[in-house]
Amino acid sequence: EQDIDLLNKDLQPLKSFVLNGGTPAAAALHLARTVARRAERLMVALAQDPAEHVNREALKYINRVSDFLFVAARAVNDNGKADVLWVPGKNR
């Protein structure tokens, strides 16, 4: 949480969705974030099954990991200046 706050404090507020991309390092962080989100969705799906036990703290942790990776990608993208922003009707 502290690292997220530290990285986030100098970033410009978001006014649009951020698409994967930017610098090579940011693109790699965005890719890692999508993998973490996929793992989170799988954990949530497993948690819906009464036969499965999913640790609630692990679920919270994987959520925070993906949030950290998003903020880290923005920080690596020149503090958000090199972010690839979604423009309605212009990109997908």
Image (cartoon, rainbow, N blue to C red):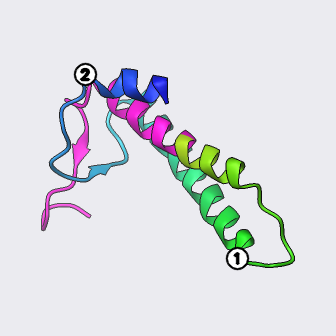
Q: Position of residue 83 (x, y in %)?
A: 25, 38
Q: Secondary structure at mark 2?
A: loop
Would you identify the image quadrant in which residue 23 lies? top left
Residue nearer the viewer, 54 or 13 = 54
Q: How many numbered marks appear?
A: 2
Q: Secondary structure at mark 1?
A: loop
Q: Residue at x 14, y 57 (%)?
A: 87
Q: Residue at x 26, y 64 (%)?
A: 92
- Which residue is disc 2 drawn over? 10
User: For the residue marked with disc 1, what is the amino acid?
Assistant: Gln
Between the C-alphas of marks 1 and 2, the distance is 38 Å
Tell me if mark 1 has few (under 14), some (14-19) or many (20+) residues whose alpha carbon lies within 10 angstroms of its own.
Answer: few
Disc on the earlier residue, 1 or 2: 2
59 to the left or right of 14: right
Q: Which residues are magenta?
A: 65-92
Q: Position of residue 34 (x, y in %)?
A: 52, 52
- Which residue is disc 1 drawn over? 48
Which numbered dot is residue 16? none
11 to the left or right of 36: left
Q: Position of residue 3 (x, y in %)?
A: 47, 23
Q: Residue at x 84, y 71 (%)?
A: 52
